[in-house]
Image (spheres, rainbow, N blue to C red):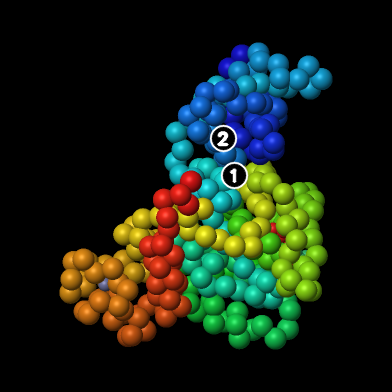
Amino acid sequence: MKLNGLIIKGIGGFYYIEADEDGKIYECKARGKFRKEKITPYAGDRVLIDTDVIIDSEIENTAAIDEIYERRNYIIRPPVANLDNLFIISSVKEPSPDTLLIDKAAAIATMSEITPILVLTKTDLSGFDEITAEIKAIYDMAGIKCIVVSSVTNKGVSEVKKLLDGKISAFTGNSGVGKSTLLNALFPDFNLKTGETSQKLGRGRHTTREVELHKIDGGYVADTPGFSTFDMARQGMNDKEQLIYGFSDFMPYFGKCRFTSCTHTGEKGCAIAEAVNNSEIAKSRYQSYLAMYDEIKDIKSWQIM
Ligand SMILES: Nc1nc2c(ncn2[C@@H]2O[C@H](COP(=O)(O)OP(=O)(O)OP(=O)(O)O)[C@@H](O)[C@H]2O)c(=O)[nH]1
Ligand SMILES: [Mg+2]
Ligand SMILES: [Zn+2]
């Protein structure tokens, strides 16, 4: 029997697919043709499965993935397809917020037509009100929604929940920022494993091991493993001319520079640099653009995957 479904998670070459027709979870293998075509099935992919294929006689519902339907969008790290929202989770402490990292993730989302939403966690910890306000001001100005939360006091949690309902979303961010903890605060039934942050490293220890979509009110939300570094080549972003489209707050000034060839990296008469000087664009956003431009410019072809 052929069924349509959604990939919930993939581990070690096995994929778990929720079928539309019966809501059951099927354990699947992908057909060899995908490997030949270098297509990796992602969580969030819509697929056609063949339930007559038995991959393990010990397991009740098994199938093979026959077809992966065209993706609306996808990101490479974390590997997820067909997202509405990318929640960029950043903690005020352990690890400390990093605007370059936030801007990289926001740019990847924006370029893929996924809505980036910033969530500042651990704001119950004392002594971080100033940094919280500072970061919120940057993203309010950039037109990126910023929600201040605490999974301990539940502050802001219902605001996050409202944005999740009816949508497909993924949580991303450094290891230890509190992605799984926040998901547990939102949906106690998930019972996700959470970790301790290491005092020595000031960050988490990669407690979440794989991307998994969880069913919620009319939608899905994916917990993902944290990362410790975030480089542009690995995100498949290697075209410096395209980078500007990752910064929606720069768009009102785009095309208004003196030179049409302006790369906005210090040329005379750059409308974007001028907007930064006039405090119409946040300085840290522009600094991130420059750092990312520099990083992409130096990507060698062997780094592109
Ligand atoms: N005080 C405080 N601690 C928090 C909060 N959210 C998370 N933590 C703590 O931060 C640590 C890491 O939380 P996790 O939820 O495991 O972090 P994660 O982002 O899922 O990490 P990975 O799965 O490794 O990517 C745990 O010790 C949590 O208790 C919060 O809002 N306030
Ligand atoms: Mg986790
Ligand atoms: Zn310019």
Point out which mark residue 41 bears. 2
Task: Please tell me how many numbered marks the rendered image carries.
Answer: 2
Q: Quadrant of residue 289?
A: bottom left
136 sits to left or right of 209: left
Q: Amino acid at mark 2?
A: Pro
Q: Mark 1 Cα within 10 Å, few/some/many (few <14, many 20+)? A: some
In the picture shown, does residue 104 fall above or below 6?
Answer: below
Q: Nearer the viewer, residue 157 or 274?
A: 274
Image quarter hosting the N terminus: top right
Q: Which residue is mark 1?
A: 219
Image point 69% across, 38% down: which residue?
Answer: 11
Image point 56% across, 35% down: which residue?
Answer: 41
Point out which mark residue 82 bears. none
Image point 72% across, 49% down: which residue?
Answer: 209
231 sits to left or right of 245: right
| Mark 1 element type | strand
Q: Mark 2 Cα within 10 Å, few/some/many (few <14, many 20+)? A: many
Image point 77% across, 52% down: which residue?
Answer: 192
The percent position of residue 135, horizontal first and vertical second, equals 54, 77
In the picture shown, does residue 165 fall above or below 145?
Answer: above
Would you say the beta carbon of the disc 2 residue lies within 8 angstroms of ligand 2? no
Res. 158 in view: no
The percent position of residue 40, horizontal first and vertical second, equals 55, 36
| Mark 2 element type | loop
Would you say the beta carbon of the disc 1 residue lies within 8 angstroms of ligand 2? no
Cα distance, mark 2 to mark 1? Answer: 20 Å
287 sits to left or right of 2: left
